[in-house]
Amino acid sequence: MDRLIDHLCKLIKIIMVVFLAVMVVLVFGNVVLRYGFNSGLAVSDELSRWLFVWITFMGAVVAMREGTHLGTDTLISRLSVRGQKICFVIANLLMLFCCALLAKGAWQIVGMNMATKSPVMELSEGLFYGCGIFAAVTGGAVLIYKMWQLSTGQLKDSELIGVRESEEDTLDLPTAQR
């Protein structure tokens, strides 16, 4: 299961890179066309906006898996391992509840917008809002897996704190280069 989730996150990262590259090409190309040739691509703004939103939701899932969301761990880090486990369970149950709310709301908004076409690309707006369903389902799966790991003793004590105190903790650079 660990491999499956790791492969899924790797695939998501690849898709995010492709989406970002498409955004760069579209926006840069549109700037060149506007200022150089007094024209532009109508699809550039709309597609870039869609891709940006999808990248954000996909990145949230990857960050959840890797435990790289920024947060404050001042209190949690001072608790005993048992206290950290209790807080881990409570936090994950609350996040699962949020995923359920997101899935329900996204499902409703996708349903309301399936027949609505985007102004330029003329694609269903439901595809745009589908990122909420994707994030809720995959994020929920990651949370359930982490809870399963905890219940079977596979989760390391160091993984009980699911946030990073600062961005510097996520960098691999030597201290002298920071």
Image (cartoon, rainbow, N blue to C red):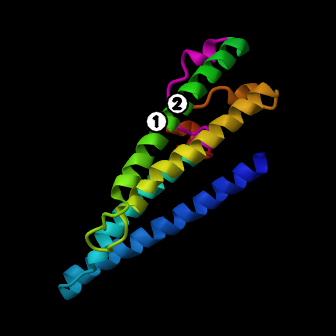
Q: Do the residues labelled 1 and 2 touch (CB within 8 Å)?
A: yes
List x then y, in percent, for residue 146.
69, 34
Residue 122 visible to an observer of this rendering:
yes
* Residue 124 occupies quadrant: bottom left
Image quarter of residue 37: bottom left
Amino acid type, mark 2: Phe
Q: What stretch is highlighted in magenta?
A: 64-79
Find disc 1 in the rendering and name its residue: 101
User: 67 or 150: which is nearer to us?
Assistant: 150
In terms of image quadrants, where is residue 153? top right
Does residue 177 show up?
A: no
Residue 118 % position (x, y): 30, 67
Task: Indicate left or right for 56 with 80 as reference.
Answer: left
> Helix, strand or loop at disc 1?
helix
Distance from disc 1 to disc 2, alpha carbons, whole Å, reads: 6 Å
Magenta-drawn stretch contains 60 = no
Image-based side of 106 in relation to 150, left or right: left
Q: Magenta span has 78?
A: yes
User: Could you tell me which residue is drawn at 65 percent across and 16 percent down?
Assistant: 86
Which label was assigned to residue 97?
2
Q: Is the magenta stretch mostly helix, strand or loop?
A: loop
Q: Residues within 10 Å of mark 2 (few under 14, many from 20)?
A: some
Q: In this view, does 29 lie above or below 95?
A: below
The amino acid type, in three-letter code, at marker 1 is Leu
Q: Residue at x 48, y 66 (%)?
A: 19
Q: How many labels does the image show?
A: 2
Q: Which residue lies furthest to the left in this view?
A: 38
What residue appears at the point 37 percent right and 49 percent down from the top-left corner? Answer: 109
Outermost residue toward the bottom?
A: 37
